[in-house]
Image (spheres, helix red, strand yellow):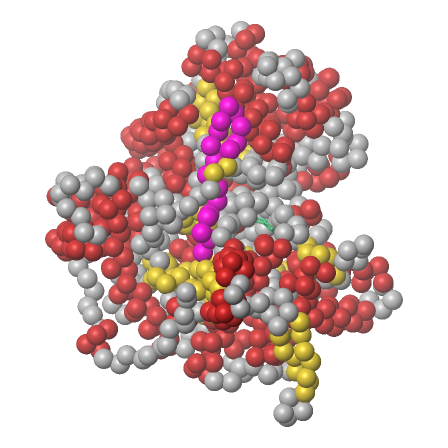
């Protein structure tokens, strides 16, 4: 049973004002022994690596704790403006290695473990990923937190503490099998429960309109079934700067009242079932990376996050400023990670009006001045919508507020464009139809002062397409914030070899100011430097090939070109185009067309949403093609293909440093940004890609000679729609014809007749939205240029160096600085005690 703890203020400095703990080897050894022996009760017969991990985690955590406390003081005592990143997903991956890096104790911890006879690597390897996200959007949130802390910005993350994160993927007979990810099984040393900040979230019930004592019209939400939100705080250390920010994750728990009432009425089983209903809310992450519409549990999750987080912020405000909200908007900013937390807009209205007794106009002014919305998709089918009746049943008060927001918004539209009913219909937050739907993106736009896309092209396409009407009304709201990734995890942590070389060459400043990494560009023409660069890449390729061998049983010879595509499996990302190219290479080998051949190791990895049949079939095809190719003695080292199961943050930490060629094949105009593309670039892979998302900006930065571009532009794609004729394309292209013939004749599904027909039909359909056949020729030609370029080792290494050297723009430090300068306007807060 959960109780909200009574809060007591402690004033004794003797209790709280401790000095920093030592970061040196003896200090670490001392604490490690203490935790191992006393807290964990272990001894010389300990055989579980988990205890060795936990003792180090606790030792490191202590060193975060005092920095965390000082950071809190600095924020509280300065009354500074705060930012909040609201996200249904935070794909954090492992914590230990990153915490040690950011504290600057990686080497000391390594020595300490060595002196104790413990293998640090094995120990760190036993940590389970915090997989509380699907892919790009969730990992972006995690990189953002790292950069906010590194820039010393007072930003807090708010999310959900899912009991089960992203499913674990196994491949059985070439098929994806999903298994639950019980990541909290062995406990989580990085979280701290904070029962003193429990919130109560309402569901169901009805609203009552009444007149207050002072005669004002008020609303209360009654007969609701309430759920408690219990916060768990996770420390987010900045890079060697003394700042430790907070990620607050909410867990759902049943209220006491529920249980008591039903227990006494004798409904024991019913009461336990009710408890389950409450706790179900945070049980599992939805494993779709495009919206799955209409699942009421998902809506419960979304409102649960928005409500608990906003109440938490308001409680803190009221504690200090009482009922004075005149400065609230100037001191708080909420960034909505896609529409998933967009209930925050009506929820803030509810809190201000119903709980804080504010009138509509003042509440609306505050809401619109504090909310900012980031869009992550261009696919119209992925825009979130909720059936209005379902919404009203679950959140009656919130629906009322949304309808009022819409009514006022519609009158604004009609005074701007009198009589334009068609436009009103288009722009309404409520989509009319047999079952009216709430358009969450429109709600987010109407309730925000800023709306941004995540790459230049994406932001451009948003205002020309999906959000055109809104852009005409409010051009000042729309802006671009090109994504990034954190160079701490994605270079310094995952590629120690490259990091040492770079630091030795230009110093260590690049880790917190990635633009400085351009200083290695001058070394690209220096043979000795190239030699070292090449050796590091080779070592990383060996590390990757060990993983592939162990997990897939496929032998990758590190002399070959490592050609990698890892990301969620989606038709628009065109893993299919990749595999068609693989089939083409196989066909060439079989025909003996191998003059001047470049050996290739093709690695593909990614999860398919469990309900996405076509994506799962693509996985099966990749596995079947791999089986045929790898088993053919005529192929040998010329071509190897592997599907790596259970792609994850931790897998990417091994994959991107060992990659030569980064595959970014989305149909132009469909990938909002991409972020894997940036991780590869930073680690010296060359991109083969379409002019889509951030690929365009990557190419701009590195120069067209150091990027393999192919395919239609987004304009050409749209132009072609309507008279797209894949059959004609196939019949005109000999090599594509051969590939299709191999597929059709069942060469990759000998005992599974017709298995891949849906794929063949999709490629041949004039309605194929992803236009796979249209880009085949251009892709194959670009791959030929890649193969030729790889034969020139010096030239390739030069390109590799330049890719890393030109990756400065893609640090989330730059992205977050842009958010801060143009949207949040927060002041960096130095923390007393430094480092
Ligand atoms: C929504 C409603 C119900 C269930 C699931 C969802 C849902 C969950 C996750 C919808 C979308 C997502 C994730 C989207 C995503 O990851 N988008 C990617 O975001 C990256 C960061 O901006 C971009 O780089 C990618 O281009 C974009 O595809």
Range of magenta residues: 161-177
Whole-percent x, y for residue 6 in the image: 37, 77
Question: Quick check: 693 above or below 198?
Answer: above
Camera-nearest residue between 29 and 684: 29
Whole-percent x, y for residue 744 in the image: 67, 16
Quadrant that contains the C terminus: bottom left
Seen as rendered, the residue at the extreme front is: 266
Q: What residue is rendered at 63% in x and 66% in y?
A: 204
Q: What residue is rendered at 35% in x and 58% in y?
A: 191
Whole-percent x, y for residue 178 in the image: 50, 37
User: As drawn, is 832 to the left or to the right of 729?
Assistant: left
Camera-nearest residue between 552 and 254: 254
Whole-percent x, y for residue 597 in the image: 48, 14
Q: What residue is rendered at 37% in x and 63% in y?
A: 193
Answer whether residue 416 is magenta in the image.
no
User: As drawn, is 648 to the left or to the right of 572?
Assistant: left
Quadrant that contains the N terminus: bottom left
Camera-nearest residue between 405 and 103: 405
Question: Quick check: 172 above or below 352?
Answer: above
Answer whether residue 165 is magenta in the image.
yes
Camera-nearest residue between 721 and 351: 351
Q: What residue is rendered at 45% in x and 35% in y?
A: 646
Whether residue 543 is visible: yes
User: As drawn, is 373 to the left or to the right of 81?
Assistant: right
Question: Quick check: 225 above or below 809?
Answer: below
């Amino acid at each position: 049973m959960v109780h909200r703890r009574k809060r007591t203020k402690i004033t004794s400095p003797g209790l709280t004002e401790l000095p920093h703990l030592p970061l040196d080897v003896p200090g670490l050894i001392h604490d490690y022994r203490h935790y191992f022996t006393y807290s964990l009760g272990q001894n010389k017969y300990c055989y579980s690596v988990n205890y060795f991990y936990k003792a180090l985690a606790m030792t490191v955590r202590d060193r975060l704790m005092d920095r965390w406390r000082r950071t809190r003081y600095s924020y509280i005592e300065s009354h500074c403006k705060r930012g909040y990143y609201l996200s249904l997903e935070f794909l954090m991956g492992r914590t230990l290695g990153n915490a040690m890096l950011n504290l600057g104790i990686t080497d000391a911890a390594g020595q300490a473990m060595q002196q104790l006879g413990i293998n640090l690597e094995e120990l760190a390897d036993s940590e389970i990923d915090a997989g509380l996200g699907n892919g790009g959007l969730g990992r972006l949130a995690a990189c953002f937190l790292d950069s906010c802390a590194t820039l010393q910005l007072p930003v807090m993350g708010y999310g959900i503490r899912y009991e089960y994160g992203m499913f674990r993927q196994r491949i059985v007979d070439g098929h994806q099998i999903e298994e639950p990810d019980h990541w909290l099984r062995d406990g989580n040393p990085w979280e701290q429960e904070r029962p003193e900040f429990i919130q109560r979230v309402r569901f169901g019930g009805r609203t009552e309109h009444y007149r207050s004592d002072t005669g004002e019209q008020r609303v209360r939400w009654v007969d609701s079934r309430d759920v408690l939100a219990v916060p768990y705080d996770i420390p987010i250390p900045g890079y060697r700067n003394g700042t430790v920010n907070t990620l607050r994750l909410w867990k759902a728990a049943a209220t006491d009242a529920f249980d008591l009432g039903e227990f006494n009425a004798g409904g024991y089983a019913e009461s336990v079932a009710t408890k389950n209903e409450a706790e179900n809310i945070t049980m599992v992450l939805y494993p779709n990376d495009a919206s799955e519409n209409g699942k009421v549990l998902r809506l419960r999750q979304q409102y649960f996050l928005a409500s608990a987080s906003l109440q938490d912020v308001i409680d803190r405000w009221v504690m200090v400023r009482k009922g004075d909200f005149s400065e609230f908007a100037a001191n708080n900013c909420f960034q909505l990670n896609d529409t998933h937390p967009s209930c925050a807009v009506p929820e803030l209205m509810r809190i201000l009006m119903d709980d804080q007794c504010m009138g509509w106009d003042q509440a609306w002014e505050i809401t619109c001045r504090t909310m900012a919305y980031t869009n992550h998709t261009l696919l119209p089918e992925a825009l979130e919508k909720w059936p209005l009746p379902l919404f009203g049943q679950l959140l009656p008060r919130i629906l009322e507020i949304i309808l009022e927001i819409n009514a006022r918004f519609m009158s604004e539209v009609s005074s701007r464009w009198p009589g334009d009913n068609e436009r009103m219909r288009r722009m309404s937050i409520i989509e009319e139809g047999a079952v009216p739907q709430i358009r969450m993106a429109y709600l987010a736009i109407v309730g925000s002062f800023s709306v941004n896309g995540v790459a230049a092209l994406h932001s451009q396409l948003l205002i020309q397409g999906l959000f055109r009407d809104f852009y005409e009304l409010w051009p000042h709201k729309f802006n671009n914030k090109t994504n990034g990734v954190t160079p701490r995890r994605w270079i310094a942590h995952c590629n120690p070899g490259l990091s040492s070389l770079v630091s030795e060459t230009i110093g260590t400043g690049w880790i917190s100011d990635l633009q400085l990494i351009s200083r290695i560009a001058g070394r690209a023409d220096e043979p000795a430097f190239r030699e070292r660069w090449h050796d590091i890449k080779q070592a990383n390729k060996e590390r990757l090939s060990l993983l592939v061998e162990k997990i897939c049983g496929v032998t990758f010879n590190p002399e070959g070109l490592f050609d990698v595509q890892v990301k969620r499996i989606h038709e628009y990302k065109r893993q299919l185009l990749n595999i068609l190219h693989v089939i083409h290479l196989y066909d060439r080998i079989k025909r003996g067309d191998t003059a001047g051949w470049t050996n290739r190791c093709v690695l593909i990895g990614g999860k398919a949403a469990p309900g996405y049949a076509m994506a799962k079939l693509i996985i099966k095809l990749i596995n079947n093609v791999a089986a045929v190719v790898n088993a053919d003695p005529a192929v040998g080292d010329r071509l190897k293909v592997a599907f790596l199961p259970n792609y994850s943050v931790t897998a990417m930490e091994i994959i991107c440093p060992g990659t030569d060629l980064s595959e970014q094949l989305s149909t132009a105009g469909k990938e909002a940004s991409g972020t894997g593309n940036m991780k590869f670039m930073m680690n010296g892979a060359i991109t083969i890609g379409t002019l889509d998302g951030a690929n365009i900006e990557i190419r701009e930065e590195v120069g067209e000679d150091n990027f393999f571009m192919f395919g239609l532009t987004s304009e050409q794609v749209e132009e072609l729609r309507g008279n797209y004729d894949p059959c004609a394309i196939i019949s005109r292209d000999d090599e594509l014809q051969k590939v299709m013939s191999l597929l059709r004749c069942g060469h990759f599904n000998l005992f599974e007749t017709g298995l891949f027909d849906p794929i063949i039909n999709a490629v041949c359909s004039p309605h194929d939205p992803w236009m796979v056949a249209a880009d085949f020729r251009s892709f194959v030609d670009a791959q030929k240029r890649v193969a030729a370029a790889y034969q020139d080792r010096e030239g390739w290494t030069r390109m590799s160096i330049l890719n890393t050297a030109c990756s400065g723009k893609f640090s989330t430090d730059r992205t977050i600085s842009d958010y801060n300068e143009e949207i949040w306007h927060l002041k960096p807060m130095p923390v007393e005690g430094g480092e």
